[in-house]
C-alpha cells in the first residue's frame, strides 16, 4: 500500500510518519519510508519551481513503485497541488491540517488544501493519530 502523508512544512509530517513506521514495524509489517528531503538531497535537486516539484513527485513515486514486496510504503512530502497528488496516485492519503502557514512563503502560495484524502489530522499529536491510522490500516 502506497501512503502519502502530506501537508505544509512544519505540519508534523515527518514526526507522524516516524510514529506510524515504528508501530507498523513493531507489528512485524514490512514498511519502507521515503522522505522527500532525503530524496531531494540524494538527487541534489533543490528546484522548488512547479516543474521541480513535479520532478520530485515523480522521483518519489517511481521509488515507491519499485517496493512491491513490502506491506506499506509511506511517503512524506508537501504535495502542494492537486496535480502533484494525482501524479503520485497514493492508495491512502493523510492530510496534516495542523497549521495555516508553513515556514516557506513560496510553498504557502502554491499550496491548495486537498479535497480528497482518507484522514485529516487536525492536531500535532503523533501518538494519538498514529494509533488511529494503524487501526484504519488493519
Image (cartoon, rainbow, N blue to C red):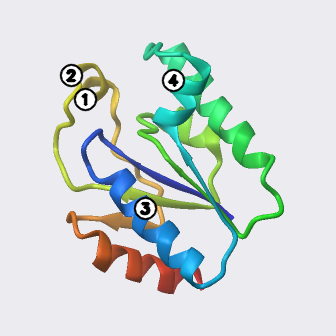
* Mark with earlier residue (4, 3): 3
Q: Mark 1 points at which residue?
A: 108
How packed mark 2 is, by other alpha carbons closer than 10 Å (few <14, some 14-19, many 20 or more), is few
* Mark with earlier residue (2, 3): 3
Residue 26 x/y as whole percent = 55, 81
* Residue in the foreground of this view, choosing between 26 and 11: 26
Residue 105: numbered disc:
2
Measured in 3D between alpha carbons, the distance from the residue under mark 4 to the one under mark 2, in whole angstroms, is: 15 Å
SS for callout 1: helix
How packed mark 1 is, by other alpha carbons closer than 10 Å (few <14, some 14-19, many 20 or more), is some
Measured in 3D between alpha carbons, the distance from the residue under mark 2 to the one under mark 3, in whole angstroms, is: 26 Å
Residue 29 x/y as whole percent = 66, 77
* Residue in the foreground of this view, choosing between 115 and 73: 73
Q: Mark 3 points at which residue?
A: 18
Residue 53: numbered disc:
4
SS for callout 3: helix
Q: In which quarter of the image is residue 15?
A: bottom left
Give me the residue at 26% from left, 24% from top.
109
* Residue in the foreground of this view, choosing between 17 and 11: 17
* Mark with earlier residue (1, 3): 3
On the rendered image, what quadrant is the N terminus found in? bottom right
* Above/below status of 83 relative to 51: below
Give me the residue at 54% from left, 16% from top.
45
Give me the residue at 31% from left, 26% from top.
107
Amino acid at each position: 500500500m502506497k501512503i502519502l502523508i502530506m501537508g505544509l512544512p512544519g505540519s508534523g509530517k515527518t514526526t507522524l510518519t516516524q510514529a506510524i513506521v515504528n508501530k507498523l514495524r513493531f507489528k512485524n509489517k514490512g514498511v519502507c519510508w521515503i522522505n522527500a528531503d532525503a530524496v531531494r538531497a540524494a538527487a541534489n535537486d533543490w528546484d522548488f519551481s512547479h516543474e521541480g516539484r513535479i520532478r520530485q513527485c515523480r522521483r518519489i513515486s517511481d521509488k515507491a513503485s519499485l517496493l512491491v514486496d513490502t506491506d506499506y510504503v509511506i511517503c512524506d512530502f508537501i504535495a502542494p497541488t492537486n496535480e502533484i497528488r494525482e501524479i503520485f496516485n497514493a492508495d491512502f492519503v493523510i492530510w496534516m491540517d495542523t497549521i495555516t502557514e508553513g515556514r516557506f512563503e513560496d510553498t504557502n502560495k502554491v499550496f491548495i488544501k486537498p479535497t480528497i484524502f482518507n484522514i485529516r489530522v487536525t492536531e500535532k499529536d503523533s501518538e494519538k493519530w498514529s494509533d488511529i491510522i494503524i487501526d484504519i490500516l488493519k
